[in-house]
């Protein structure tokens, strides 16, 4: 199969840019001890692949699900950025929607966790609304939920703004891309809520009287707060990402 020169050269350029940026960011993270060596290597690979497959869908987050989706997107489109348009292709629209949903979930959950911890509000368990200690799996605050919507919105804004520069579509369809913003807000919030619900029910939380903190493992000095030991934190994240990815993909196919 003959690869068009324009496609080949653009892929080479994006690959070089991706490798350079990924190397710089991963090296800085390892230097600052934000990541260990294995985390830095994984981050480099994921980031480099994302940028190589397209500038707009790279939002600097690590994910195997999104990595698989962007590789499929690259194969199907030849690296050509696309607008969300089910009339053109429901599959590509679903893939793009899934990628958006994935990152809205990741970013929304991250913002919710980080800002929620800094909040002066008393967290409440999402299943019972009873006050719980900070750090309890499934504990939510109003500020944290608002942060989750903001995290989703940022992803949507990134998609729309960069898309204006990279995607070719009609004026009417370009305007319709603004609908990504409320979808992204909903995906950010939904992802955080699903994560919290799973954390409150299928992930154990208890208070350790010796360590004076909330822990996720049972022990003789641990008093149960909520949940059962079915999923760990990584599994909770993976499930919430998969659900949000699938729902956002379906929503984009239906709306666009």
Image (cartoon, helix red, strand yellow):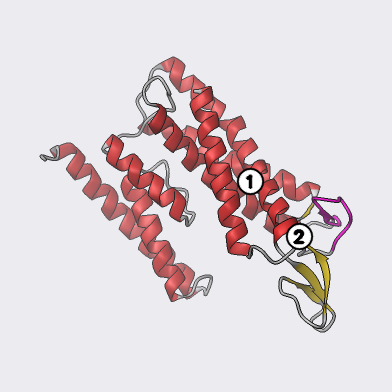
Q: Which type of secondary structure does the marked residue at label 2 adopt?
A: helix
Identify the residue shown where x is 40% and y is 51%: 67
Instruction: Indicate yes or no whether the magenta region holds residue 29.
Output: no
Residue 44 position, x and y percent, is: 38, 63
Identify the residue shown where x is 31% and y is 49%: 52
Identify the residue shown where x is 36% and y is 61%: 45
Q: Is residue 15 above or below residue 104?
A: below
Which quadrant of the structure image shows residue 81?
A: top left
Q: Is residue 22 above or below residue 27?
A: above
**Gap between marks 1 and 2 measured at Cα:** 20 Å
Q: Is residue 10 above or below residue 19?
A: above
Residue 105 position, x and y percent, is: 59, 47
Q: In this view of the protein, which residue sits in the foreground, 244 or 154?
A: 244
Q: Residues within 10 Å of mark 2 (few under 14, many from 20)?
A: few
Q: Which type of secondary structure does the marked residue at label 1 adopt?
A: helix
Start and end of the magenta stretch? Answer: 121-132
**Circle 2 sits on which residue?**
118
Which quadrant of the structure image shows residue 76?
A: top left
**Circle 1 sits on which residue?**
191
């Amino acid at each position: 199969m003959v690869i068009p020169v324009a496609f080949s050269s653009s892929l080479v350029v994006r690959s070089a840019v991706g490798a350079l940026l990924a190397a710089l960011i991963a090296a800085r993270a390892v230097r600052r001890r934000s990541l260990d060596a294995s985390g830095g290597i994984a981050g480099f690979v994921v980031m480099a692949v994302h940028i190589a497959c397209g500038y707009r869908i790279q939002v600097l987050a690590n994910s195997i699900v999104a990595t698989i989706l962007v590789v499929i997107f690259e194969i199907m489109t030849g690296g050509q950025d696309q607008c969300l348009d089910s009339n053109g292709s429901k599959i590509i629209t679903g893939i793009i929607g899934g990628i958006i949903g994935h990152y809205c979930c990741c970013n929304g959950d991250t913002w919710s966790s980080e800002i929620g911890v800094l909040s002066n509000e008393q967290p409440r368990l999402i299943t019972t609304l009873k006050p719980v200690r900070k750090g309890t799996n499934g504990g939510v605050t109003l500020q944290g939920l608002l942060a989750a919507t903001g995290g989703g919105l940022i992803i949507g804004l990134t998609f729309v703004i960069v898309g204006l520069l990279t995607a070719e579509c009609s004026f009417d369809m370009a305007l319709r891309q603004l609908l990504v913003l409320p979808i992204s807000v909903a995906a950010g919030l939904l992802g955080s809520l699903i994560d919290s619900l799973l954390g409150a029910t299928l992930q154990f939380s208890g208070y350790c009287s010796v360590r004076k903190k909330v822990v996720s493992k049972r022990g003789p000095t641990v008093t149960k707060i909520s949940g059962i030991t079915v999923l760990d934190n990584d599994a909770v994240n993976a499930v919430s990402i998969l659900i949000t990815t699938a729902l956002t993909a379906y929503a984009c196919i239906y709306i666009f």
